Image (spheres, helix red, strand yellow):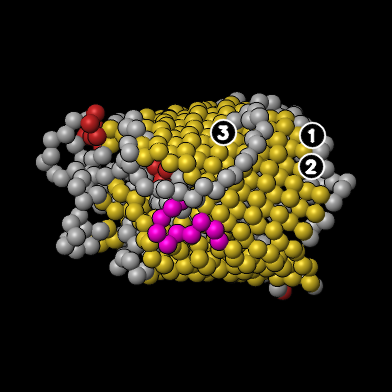
Amino acid sequence: MKHNTKIVWVIGTILFLSQTAWSQVDDQQDGEVQDAEIVIEKERKIKLNNERKLYEFIKWKPERTSVISPPSEFKWYIYDVANEPVDFEPAQASVSENLRTYRHYGKAGLGNYASPLLDVSLTGASVVDHMIGLNVKHRSFGTGEVDGENSGAAVTELNIFGGLIREQFRLESGLNYRLEKNYYYGYPEGTVVGNNDIKHRANFLNLNLGIVDNFDDDDWAYRADFNFRNYSDNFNAKENTIKGEFDLGYSEILYLNTEVVLSKYQDVGIDESRSYFRLNPYYRLLIEGLILDLGNSVSLQNDDFPDLGSSRFFPYAKASYPLLDGYTVFAELDGGYTFNSLYEFAGEVGVLNQSTTLANSEQLFDFSGGISGNPTERLSLTAKVSFQSVRYLPVMVNNVLDQSRIDLIYDVENSKIFAFIGKALYEINASHELSMGVNLFSYSSKGYDQIYHRPTSEILISGSHEVLPRLQAKWNFTFMGGLVARGIQVTDPDVNLEAISKLDLELHYQLKEQWGIFLSGENMMNQNYSRYLYYPQRGIQIRGGATFRF
């Protein structure tokens, strides 16, 4: 049974299509904190910002290893997932007519574990008021660490994106389709299984349309985002989700943020209609440099589980204050619900079990605060702490009947989570850049002795270097510790997973103006690690190939 929360929403026509690539987005450095809240500000210039295109040379870090992520977002950490393209600033126009910019990029290669790579990005000509582009990529491993083909994996992805600028508004739109193939290879050693019997093929479709106010001659500002997501697999799981986000501002002092989600989830023995609604009005005070937002957070949801409420009202506050020497202190207080979807869980854990129970998480209390600044022109620092009290926190454990399947369960008690997030970005010079992040987490719960498969520490270090005028190098080192898995049987002790230390490196040499070659290596320390119990990952992965641009 579910509480019947009626939410009526009208969605405008979705024009172009996408999830991961916008043709116009606000200029931002890779790795910076991106707040979940959208603050509306008028733009005084009509322009196209950075294009999101394939970085033609380097895969510089594995998936989901952002130096810093909001503590309120606990995403599962996945290795061995393709992460091209990444954002980069396109070549700048030059007064020299002999220099040219490039709009089309490609990368193709082959490596051990029968691992081909193809990534092609095509972008329409840059004009003042519109942009369109296409990206196609494929990355796969024919074999893995367990029984050859039984532990292979593949990702194929299509992105179409576009943007349109007019004097009064800006449109951002796109489509993302992703096909992932994984295998349930976490079975006991010596088990005889058929390759097709353990194959999991998942489809992810995401369509998005956004409109942003671009008109400066009145006191109003707005932003609206419409999103449709579909998930299906080769078993019987299917989920369709419609999401709308609307943000309205008046005279830069009154704001209203609204979020609506309608979802339909079907699987064997499951047919659920789910909904979520959030209303966040607030008033902005400006007091001698202090920016203080005060308001309320009103949230409604219809998942019907013990001790999970259908509505929540909580005060909302957010503040920032500039200190001397370029430092800023900030803090935020909020509460409500997190809408949990199969689309997200299946995308993060490719060996998720079928007939998964979906429940929203209730944020009983969410406070964060910290300081950021620039000690020098080339060095930026951020330190942030947070404390959360969460009911129905998602937890990943191995199934008691089939250890190869990862079950999604929930901590129905109040999980208390303390996090420290620190990051540093140092631009040594125009040719060399370093970034570092330290993430520390502490969990406590009355329901579980451990919050399984969640790290307590992460260290993330990456570097980008122009070794020679034609030679570029990028590397990424990741450490993850504190992972604990639940024993299969109730009487079995918990399993402490070995800390993960992973080093990735890629070199690119520009042979000619339009052609280059690359050589990359992942897990260069050849560590035998498992992110999830019974799922050993691949050892050293070497790949080489060619790049092009025109």
Q: Mark 1 = which residue?
A: 166
The Cα–Cα distance between marks 2 and 3, rounded to whole angstroms, is: 23 Å
Q: Are marks 1 and 2 in contact (CB under 8 Å)?
A: yes
Q: What residue type is labelled 3?
A: Leu
Q: Nearer the viewer, residue 344 or 274?
A: 274
Between 516 and 269, the one nearer to me in the picture = 269
Residues marked 3 and 1 touching at CB (< 8 Å): no
- Badge 2 or badge 3: first in the primary sequence: 3
Stretch of the chain drawn in magenta: 303-312
Residue 59, compared with residue 339, is above or below; it is: above
Q: Are there few (<14), some (14-19), or many (20+) residues within 10 Å of tag 3?
A: many
The overriding secondary structure of the stretch rendered in magenta is loop
Report the amino acid beneath label 1. Answer: Arg
At 83% from the left edge and 56% from the top edge, which residue is drawn?
251
- Element assignment for label 3: strand
**In terms of depth relative to the viewer, which is nearer, 336 or 65?**
336
- At 24% from the left and 34% from the top, the residue drawn is 198
Q: Give the residue number, with chain letter if any, for mark 2.
A: 214
Which tag, 1 or 2, sits closer to the chain's start? 1
Q: Quadrant of residue 513?
A: top right
